[in-house]
Image: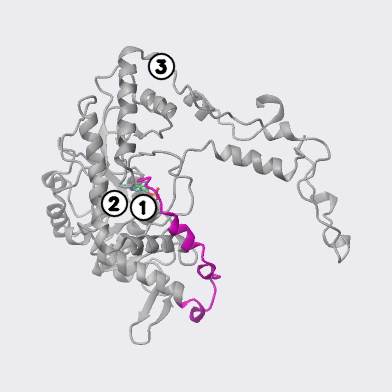
């Protein structure tokens, strides 16, 4: 069992020094800080050496679970392995140009942006992309603003956005922030949207439908073409949440299915580490009629001179992010695409689906599977018929060094366990997970206290989650909580 290190205060001792500057050749005045600017309010500020502080934080970091340290089947989040070559190339000095550099000095970087844009257009069948949004949810917000601007320009601002009950949680939030009223529509017993049900909800106030496809049950929305047609006939648009694109990348193009707006998560499908809130990227692709509403800046290529230029003004929604978005995430995505090659992208999707279905088949005899439709890159079980809760199973998995799957989402499944292994895991890893699940479920039947008191082998045992949320303490305070 990994131990929780002592607080940094334990290592502190009066007079220990982390780093000392030698005398400044320009005289002390230049570096002296006026007494009024020196903090006086940190009582017992630990005085430690450099090596002590490095070890302290390194040891703390080892308590974190990560894709590099273990299996991480967090559904919908696509915690795939991110090849190290992406990091290596993104670290090239040449890519770290100042964002205000004159364009003739950063032609290579502009080419990266244009090249990635073209890759994404080809892969998705969307005629144009913006690469500036900083995350999936940000992409949704940008996409909804594009829809709003487009409809207003036609003189028919509409009020309502339809969202299925199986959509990702960020969808209603983004539509709401873009000023829309949300109307939830139910999915059917197959776990997908019925064209007839969508049609019932259509009227002249419906701006768009936001559809996560494959949806959060891992099921392909097979009526999408019909639904798109019904929306278009009504003057409404189809927004497709493509954060789950690893389920059919290289095989199906959302543009061919009728999507008007699509966002992708580069930090999921195209392999940038995420999960700690680090920089992400949520490019948004649009159909031809929405092209003029894309946010700026946009990179243009003169095909004759091979020169790249940047456009800062158009009729669109303006700027949504400083500079060019999270540029180094774009570099990683492009490296990922080139290192795999177009011909291997189908294989990514096939393996993602194969791995998820392997787990489905092995666990189906043991767990309730509320939706029997064919699933793609993830599978959602329920804790119905069990004498323990999903939370207990998740906590017990921690003792096996496995990050739990996504729990209690989507809401339409009782005690949901949403499992997404991703394509980068070997059969051995999947088998180890399945064996762990079997053991946990056997314990649940024979000795449920083991689960109810889990985890047993982690540095911190089970927390009182209600208390932790209500009385969240995230700062050390001397008297009360150390
Ligand atoms: C992850 C995810 C999002 C949100 O992406 P963020 O980058 O976390 O904002 C939206 N939709 C789906 C389906 C997702 O899986």
Viewer-side label of 1, 2? 2
- 92 within the magenta span: yes
Q: Residue at x 14, y 48 (%)?
A: 222
State which region is magenta.
Answer: 78-107
On the picture, is 21 further left or further right than 356?
right
First along the sequence among labels 1 and 2 = 1
Residue topped by disc 2: 246
Residue at the image position 65 percent from the left and 40 percent from the top: 55
Q: x, y percentage for residue 50?
A: 72, 45
Instruction: State which tag comes first along the sequence, 3 or 1.
Output: 1
Q: Is residue 22 above or below residue 63?
A: below
Residue 166 visible: no
Residue 450 circle label: 3
Q: Residue 460: percent from the left, percent from the top?
A: 53, 26
In this picture, residue 309 sits left or right of residue 213:
right
Look at the image and tell me whether residue 130 can be seen: yes
Q: Are marks 3 and 1 in contact (CB under 8 Å)?
A: no
- Sort mark 2 into few (<14), some (14-19) or many (20+) by Cα contacts within 10 Å: many
What is the secondary structure assignment of the residue under circle 1?
loop
Q: How is the image coloured?
A: one colour
The residue to which callout 1 is attached is 179
Frontmost residue, 301 versus 183: 301
């Amino acid at each position: 069992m990994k131990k929780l290190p002592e607080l940094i205060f334990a290592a502190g001792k009066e007079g220990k020094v982390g780093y000392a500057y030698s005398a400044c050749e320009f005289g002390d005045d230049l570096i002296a800080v006026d007494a009024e600017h020196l903090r006086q309010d940190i009582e017992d500020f630990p005085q430690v050496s450099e090596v002590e502080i490095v070890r302290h934080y390194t040891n703390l970091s080892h308590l974190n679970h990560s894709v590099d340290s273990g299996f991480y089947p967090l559904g919908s989040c696509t915690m795939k392995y991110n090849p190290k070559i992406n990091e290596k190339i993104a670290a090239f000095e040449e890519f770290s140009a100042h964002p205000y550099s004159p364009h003739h000095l950063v032609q290579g970087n502009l080419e990266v942006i244009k090249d990635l844009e073209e890759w994404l257009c080809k892969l998705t069948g969307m005629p144009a992309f913006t690469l500036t949004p900083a995350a999936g949810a940000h992409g949704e917000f940008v996409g909804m603003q594009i829809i709003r601007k487009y409809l207003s320009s036609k003189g028919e601002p509409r009020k309502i956005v339809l969202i299925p009950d199986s959509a990702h949680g960020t969808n209603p939030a983004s539509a709401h922030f873009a000023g829309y009223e949300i109307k939830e529509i139910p999915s059917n017993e197959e776990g997908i949207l019925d064209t007839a049900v969508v049609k019932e909800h259509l009227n002249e106030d419906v701006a768009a439908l936001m559809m996560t496809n494959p949806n959060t049950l891992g099921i392909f929305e097979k009526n999408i073409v019909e639904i798109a047609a019904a929306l278009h006939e009504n003057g409404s648009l189809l927004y497709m949440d493509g954060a789950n694109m690893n389920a059919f990348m290289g095989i199906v193009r959302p543009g061919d299915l009728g999507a008007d707006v699509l966002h992708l998560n580069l930090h999921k499908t195209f392999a940038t580490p995420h999960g700690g809130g680090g920089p992400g990227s949520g490019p948004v692709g649009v159909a031809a009629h929405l092209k003029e509403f894309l946010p700026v800046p946009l990179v243009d290529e003169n095909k004759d001179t091979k020169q790249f230029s940047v456009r800062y003004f158009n009729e669109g929604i303006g700027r949504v992010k400083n500079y060019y978005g999270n540029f180094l995430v774009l570099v990683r995505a492009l490296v990922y695409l080139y290192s795999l090659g177009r011909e291997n992208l189908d294989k990514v999707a096939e393996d993602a689906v194969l791995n998820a279905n392997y787990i489905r088949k092995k666990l189906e005899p043991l767990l309730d599977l509320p939706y029997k439709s064919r699933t793609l890159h993830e599978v959602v079980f329920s804790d119905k018929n069990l004498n323990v809760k999903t939370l207990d199973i998740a906590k017990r998995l921690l003792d096996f060094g496995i990050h739990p799957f996504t729990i209690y989402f989507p809401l339409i499944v009782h005690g949901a366990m949403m499992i997404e292994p991703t394509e980068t895991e070997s059969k051995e890893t999947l088998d180890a997970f399945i064996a762990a699940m079997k053991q946990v479920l056997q314990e649940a039947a024979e000795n449920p206290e083991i689960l109810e008191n889990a985890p047993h082998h982690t540095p911190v045992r089970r927390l009182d989650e209600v208390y932790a949320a209500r009385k969240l303490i995230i700062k050390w305070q001397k008297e009360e909580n150390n």
